[in-house]
Image (cartoon, helix red, strand yellow):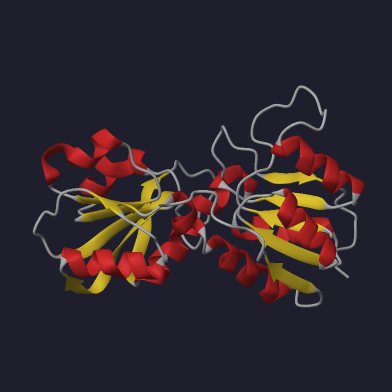
Amino acid sequence: MKTVQDICTLLESVAPLAYQESYDNAGLIVGNGYTVVTGVMICLDVSEPVIDEAIRNGCNLIISHHPLIFKGLKNITGNGRVVACLVKAIKHDLAIYASHTNLDSVLNGVNGMIARKIGLKDAEVLVPNQPFNASEPYGLGVVGNLETAVDEDEFLHLVKQTFKCQCLRYSVLTGKKVQRVAVCGGSGSEFLNQAKLAGATVFLTGEAHYHEFFTEGQDILLIDAGHFETEQFTKELFFEIISKKSPTFAIHISAAEKNPVNYL
């Protein structure tokens, strides 16, 4: 039998909570660590449909990428998504755990998974953090190399197909071959200059602002593939981590969760 704390410890052996950014709220958000786990539901964001799905499938632990509680709550009155989810989770004795920027920061975490999906080799951390007794480099973003250089158009189609994007936003094509690529899933456009310094000809992220598409001289191809799209494989990553060490209970990847952004 595995407890909630056992699963928390397992996830933190891969992505220590000490690696999270100062503004973050990763860790056990709701629930008792001593509760025996009956099943796990994996998602990017906790919502009422995900909680209902967990209840239907006999799961009493939800693992999410984004923390349900990100900012301080002053009351729990039942209004709004966060409070409604908290109330429902507590009523049904569900535990909720988040692994967020700490999982972004390990080489084999969120960005490492993106690198795997698009075929990057020799991956390394793009923006290293200062180590404190860390056994390996950690930080945000990843940079690596395609095995074979490709045209920009071919790489754009690879990204669109891999992440099942309904559309891509990208800057002016540079005319360069694509081989060295930097990635940062979710909201990572602030690391555009670090991508250039790392020698990347492409920077792939999930959110970019209008003025960033000028890319300071247009010497790098900036691609905005969508926040949900770039982080969707985090659910697969959670499944891999947990199933390798805890195969004794059901692990479900949420089917109820949908991209909250719609396209016309």
* Left or right for 228, reference 195: right
Q: Relative to 80, is 66 above or below?
A: below
Q: Residue at x 64, y 35 (%)?
A: 70
Q: Relative to 206, is 215 above or below?
A: above
Q: Which residue is drawn at 65% across and 43% down?
A: 67
Q: Residue at x 68, y 42 (%)?
A: 68
Question: Can residue 122 be seen in this snapshot?
Answer: no
Quarter of the image where the N terminus is located: bottom right
- Image spot of residue 74 (x, y percent): 76, 22
- Image spot of residue 234 (x, y percent): 55, 61
Q: Nearer the viewer, residue 214 or 114?
A: 214
Q: Nearer the viewer, residue 32 or 95?
A: 95
Give the quadrant of residue 117. bottom left
* Left or right for 245, reference 6: left
* Left or right for 34, reference 105: right
* Left or right for 31, reference 136: right
- Image spot of residue 22 (x, y percent): 56, 33
How many numbered tags mark residues here? 0
Q: Which residue is drawn at 52% across and 56% down?
A: 135
Give the quadrant of residue 35. bottom right
Q: Residue furthest top?
A: 74
- Image spot of residue 47 (x, y percent): 70, 49
